[in-house]
Every structure is written in structure tokens, then in C-alpha cells.
């Protein structure tokens, strides 16, 4: 029993030294260590992203399970990837959309666009303040004024570290459109906070809250 545990642990450590492409190829080949690694490394980020698209924890967990079930079934037929997180996020969003579309057809309700519902940590702090300064209130209003798409792009870009081409693939945007959305959001915040503040500091101030996420 102990020998098996050490074997699994050693396999897991070896996976940490590999690239996403190599791990994914192992996953496609049905390697159990790769499967465990991918699942446990990415379940939480997938859940956090999914819950911001649909605030229903059990529904999101079911969607994640469905994603992995289909990936395991596909095996060697899966395409290659340089970023496992990007691949999984895209698969999860597509699954959420499909499942919601199914329920809407059954319930015969109007199709409603998927919203990205996520608050910045600073946004929550300022909302709870009773006597904020004029600048703080202006910043709060600016944060509240960011569109769902701007929030999702900022989240994928700066919280998840994705490249613009990956973000565009997930959100079905053109590269220029994605960059403009981020630029306008950051420009607005810089104007309120002060031009002397650099973008990395602004992005630190607008980190997303995990207060209501697993």
C-alpha cells in the first residue's frame, strides 16, 4: 500500500517537471497520473470561473464532471494544447452554454446572454464603507460601470494569465476588440486613481474577490 502511494507521488512530481503539452499527451493516452494531475490542478480554477458565469455550485460541478467524462472518452482523438487551463476553460464554458440552452428549450424561456458575475475585492470593500472619500466613491462607480465582458477579459488575462488569442477563442472575440476592452477599462481606472499609478498596481487593486467562491 505504501509502495503504491510513493509510486503515485513520484509520478505526480514528475508531471510537475513536464510542460502542459507533454502532460496533455499523457492525459490523452490514458495515463492515470496525468488524469489525476489535470483534475486536481484545474478543478478549483474551473469551478471559480464557472461559478462566475453561473452562480449555481452544483450545476457547475456537474458541468466540470461532464467535461472530464467527455475528455476521457475522447482520449487520443483530443487535439493537442500548449495550455491545459485554456483548453479546460473553453470546454467548460461551451458545456455551460449547452446545458443552459437545453434547460431553456425545455422550459420555453427567452434566451438570455451568459453574464460574467464577479466582483473585485476592492469593489466589495468600498461598497461596505460608510464614509468613503470622493475618489473612493468615483472608483467604486467606475468599477461598477465595467461591462460583463470587460470583467471576464480582465479575469482571464490578469487572474488566469491567458494570452489574448486564447481569450478571444473562449469569448469569441477579435483580438483587437479584446485589447480595446481591456485598454478602456484600465484607462478609466487610471484617470480616477491617478496617472502616476502604473498598470500593475491598478490591477493589484482590482483583483477579483473569492469571498463567495469555493
Image (cartoon, helix red, strand yellow):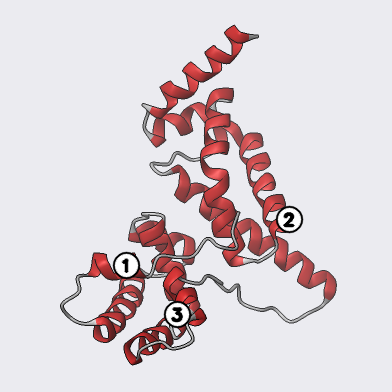
Tag 1 or tag 3, which sits nearer the N-term? 3
Q: Which residue is mark 1?
A: 203
Q: Is residue 31 visible?
A: no
Which residue is at the front of the view, 68 or 211?
211
Q: Is residue 40 left or right of residue 173?
A: right
Q: Is residue 170 visible?
A: yes
Q: Residue at x 38, y 41 (%)?
A: 82
**C-alpha separation, residue under disc 1 versus residue under disc 2:** 31 Å
Residue corresponding to mark 2? 58
Q: Judge the density around disc 2: few (<14), some (14-19), many (≥20) Cα neighbours within 10 Å.
A: few
Picture coordinates of residue 33, whole percent (x, y): 55, 24
Outermost residue toward the left in this view: 196
The residue that appears at 44% across and 86% down in the rendered structure is: 145
Name above or below for residue 113 compared with residue 142. Answer: above
Rounded to the nearest angstrom, the CA distance separating label 3 from label 1 is 16 Å
Q: Residues within 10 Å of mark 3 (few under 14, many from 20)?
A: some
Residue 119, numbered label: none
What residue is disc 3 on?
126
First in sequence: mark 1 or mark 2?
2
Amino acid at each position: 500500500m505504501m509502495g503504491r502511494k510513493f509510486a503515485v507521488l513520484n509520478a505526480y512530481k514528475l508531471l510537475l517537471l513536464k510542460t502542459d503539452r507533454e502532460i496533455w499527451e499523457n492525459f490523452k493516452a490514458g495515463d492515470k497520473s496525468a488524469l489525476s494531475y489535470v483534475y486536481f490542478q484545474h478543478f478549483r480554477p474551473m469551478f471559480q470561473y464557472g461559478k462566475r458565469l453561473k452562480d449555481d455550485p452544483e450545476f457547475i460541478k456537474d458541468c466540470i464532471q461532464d467535461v472530464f467524462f467527455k475528455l476521457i472518452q475522447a482520449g487520443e482523438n483530443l487535439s493537442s494544447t500548449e495550455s491545459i487551463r485554456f483548453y479546460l476553460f473553453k470546454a467548460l464554458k461551451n458545456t455551460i452554454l449547452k446545458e443552459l440552452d437545453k434547460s431553456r428549450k425545455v422550459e420555453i424561456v427567452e434566451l438570455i446572454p451568459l453574464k460574467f458575475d464577479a466582483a473585485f475585492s476592492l469593489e466589495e470593500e468600498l461598497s461596505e464603507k460608510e464614509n468613503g472619500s470622493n475618489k473612493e466613491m468615483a472608483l467604486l462607480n467606475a468599477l461598477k460601470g465595467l461591462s460583463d465582458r470587460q470583467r471576464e477579459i480582465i479575469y482571464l488575462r490578469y487572474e488566469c494569465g491567458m494570452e489574448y488569442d486564447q481569450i478571444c477563442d473562449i469569448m469569441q472575440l477579435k483580438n483587437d476588440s479584446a485589447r480595446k476592452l481591456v485598454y478602456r477599462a484600465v484607462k478609466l481606472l487610471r484617470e480616477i486613481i491617478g496617472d502616476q499609478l502604473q498598470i500593475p498596481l491598478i490591477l493589484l487593486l482590482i483583483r477579483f474577490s473569492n469571498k463567495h467562491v469555493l
